[in-house]
Image (cartoon, rainbow, N blue to C red):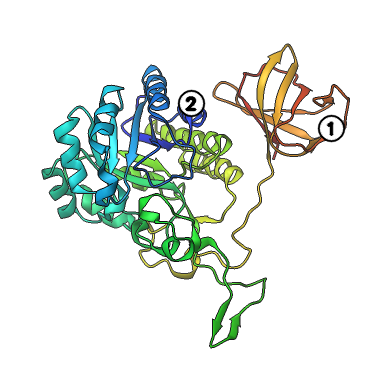
Amino acid sequence: MHMSRYELLAPAGDLNRLKTAVDFGADAVFIGGKQYSLRYRASNFTLEDIQDGATYCHDHGAQLFVTANMIFHDEDLEGFTQYLKDLERIGVDAVIVASVQAVRLVKSVAPKLEAHLSTQLSTLNSKAVNFLKRLGADRVVLGRETTLEEVDQLMKHVDVPIEVFIHGAMCTNFSGRCTLSNHMTLRDANRGGCAQSCRWRYEIYDDQKALVSDPECLFTMSSKDMRTAEILPELLATGVYSLKIEGRMKSEYYLACVVSAYRRFIDTIENGGDIENARALCNEALLKAENRESFTGFYENSEFGREGYIYGENGRLANQDFLGIIQSTDGDEVILEVRNHFKVGETLEVFGPKTNHKTFVLETLINSKDEVVDRVFRPLENVKIKVPFDVEDFDFVRRAS
């Protein structure tokens, strides 16, 4: 359990990822159920999974929030009241919703649940925050479009916990209110069906004439991802409470890297440590997890312009450093579930909640057929390697920098 003035809030798409987030330092985790969430392509949680997740979080001093932040049509409301009662019964701490009507419903049928108002509501000013509090909101998630200066001013005039995003995907449209997927794929992004059409690469035509058709410079509307290590001390100084990482569809490896990076940086800031060194370490760790270009979002500039967008192939940063997850250990012999190709002679790094970034040179490699080989390249194959120090089950292995 982390004793902090701030809450580090991490995403999880399934139970394994929830455990990873908690183990690497998250104070709270947000997940989606099988219904009512904006990420129906994520694995998502059954009620039984949610109960198991709540138990794991509470046993480790963390909280569990469930998203129900779709934009409801009448037909979507069927069963929602019972769903809220079920979440309250199994010990969920809060539900994240995107309408005042949903807040009122939470308070009337499941009063033990906190109601957090989603970024989907595009809340950007103190008057809106205070209005939402009067209507029952226990927490307000600000829209990503607020600048650092605006957050600072807002915090002087509100009396409700404020949550802000610190890392992850940005939306081309305002707070995710997008209908591109409706037009492109007949999927409603505001009811969980975002196809990320803004990240596609387009040819542009005018009256049958190609304006943009070169494969090297096709048109895209995609924003870079958010990364706030550069301004995190200033953001904490505003008095915000919850620091949110986006990414319920991200991998266990991504969560391990990102959650642990921000955990260490937040702790250093609170404990009066070396900020610049901690910032450098945080950025280094975050870059090992990313596969897209990133920047500070709207925090430093409300009209960030060209520097906030991805053009051509420049935004695709293929990351092949993550090599596998340790499944079991027997002395110095380790069973590793492979996630990427690697070979004998490479320097590998092991890290985990209790394993502090130790490195070794790979000398032996035995595949799933008990054959001695010099390289592996089949994802999810279980191979044997020898590690010259103690490691834990479910530690991560990657190429050393």
Label 2 CA crowd tier, 10 Å (few <14, some 14–19, many 20+): some
Foreground: disc 2 or disc 1: 2
Of 235 and 180, the residue lying toward us = 180
Residue lying at the far left of the rendered structure: 134
Residue type (three-letter) at the residue carrying disc 2? Lys
Position of residue 338 relative to residue 59, above or below, is below
Q: Circle 2 — which element?
A: helix
Image quadrant containing the N terminus: top left
Most foreground residue, 361 or 86 = 86
Q: Position of residue 263 (x, y in %)?
A: 45, 33
Q: Residues within 10 Å of mark 1 (few under 14, many from 20)?
A: some
Which residue does the image show at 71% across and 18% down from the upper left? Answer: 389
Residue 373: quadrant of the picture: top right
Tell me, yes or no, if residue 156 can be seen here: no
Residue 344, disc: 1
Q: Residue at x 56, y 82 (%)?
A: 205
At 33% from the left and 33% from the top, the residue drawn is: 65
Residue 19 shows which numbered tag?
2
Instruction: Describe the element under mark 1 as helix, strand or loop.
Output: loop
Q: Is residue 297 above or below residue 137?
A: below
Q: Is residue 209 left or right of residue 95?
A: right
Return the x and y of residue 299 as percentages of the image width and height. Answer: 37, 56
